[in-house]
Image: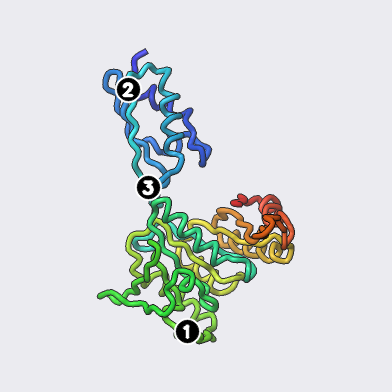
Amino acid sequence: MALTEERVLEALRTVMDPELGKDLVSLGMVDEVRVEGGRVDLLVNLPAPACPLKGQIEADIRRALAPLGAEEVRVRFGGGVRPPERYALPGVKHVVAVASGKGGVGKSTVAANLALALSREGAKVGLLDADLYGPSQAKMFGLEGMRLKVDQDRRILPLEAHGIKVLSIANIVPPGQALAWRGPILHGTLKQFLQDVNWGELDYLVVDLPPGTGDVSLSMAQSVPVAGAVVVTTPQGVSVSDVKKAVGMFRQLNIPLLGVMENMSFFVCGHCSQRTDIFGNGGGERMAQEMGIPFLG
């Protein structure tokens, strides 16, 4: 049989994206197919700029096309973070919320590491510290004491550290000053942090939400389309029960739940390397199973 674009596409329907579990054609990742004699040229757009599974995908493509008798297969990779049908904010493709129903579970640490991990995958990332009563991202990114500036259009310019654009109330309010703000002021501040900021071009804006299901979380859901939420818990029952309320809030607001992250799962002794489950074991994973949410780890 002659080597045709149709036969190539049919063969590529057997090549699965290892992470997404669907074939490349159904996912729309095969952007270009050219057949010239016995040579096949492909352009495959990956879901992330620095996809770690690129080598495996290319090997699977070559394996799938081998029975077609192609003399030469050239695979080019392109793409990056795909834009949604409509941007969440000017220049911002996706907003990802990181939340917990309870304080002290390490939600802000998870948000910071998520932002850095996405950046290291090649994405352009911003981090909004929406925990207005207890901001911590300025300290985590070494930005304490620095003041925010505005551009010629009076839009706030985020600070930048480690390749991440960071916006926190800690860089506006004097150090140590407590915020005694009620709902309307919180709503107005968050709206300004979302809409009156020159974020530039971002693939992801990670939003570090305050604990609980209060005004700030509700305001964000009303102000901007959220692509999905990651909920953070520790293993013990009292944390899990509170995080379930956050899950319920996101479901009420029709925000997709990307998954559960169990933090502080165990302690490894620096002397004997013995693992100790200080807060119990497996509470986050059990909650994810019970509520039908992916368990991220």
The residue depicted at 60 percent of the width and 59 percent of the height is: 251
Examine the rendering and report whether any part of residue 87 can be seen. Answer: no
Q: Residue at point 59% right, 73% down?
A: 214
Q: Position of residue 247 (x, y in %)?
A: 63, 60
Name the residue type under label 3.
Gly
Q: Is residue 39 above or below residue 93?
A: above
Instruction: Calculate the distance from the C-alpha at mark 1 to the C-alpha at mark 2.
Output: 63 Å
Q: Are marks 1 and 3 in contact (CB under 8 Å)?
A: no
Disc 1 residue type (three-letter)? Pro
Give the numbered dot on residue 197.
none
Which labelled disc corresponds to residue 175? Answer: 1
Q: Is residue 4 positioned above or below 295 on the image?
A: above
Tell whether 117 sits left or right of 234.
Answer: left
Please tell me whether residue 277 is drawn above or below residue 108 in the rendered image.
above
* Between discs 1 and 2, the one toward the N terminus: 2
* Residue at mark 1 to residue at mark 3: CA–CA distance: 39 Å
- Disc 1 crowd, CA 10 A, few/some/many (<14, 14-19, 20+): few
* Nearest-to-viewer mark from 1 and 3: 1
Q: Residues within 10 Å of mark 2 (few under 14, many from 20)?
A: some
The residue under label 3 is: 80
Protein image colouring: rainbow
On the image, which quarter does residue 241 sit in?
bottom right
User: Image check: 252 left or right of 115?
Assistant: right
Disc assigned to residue 72: 2
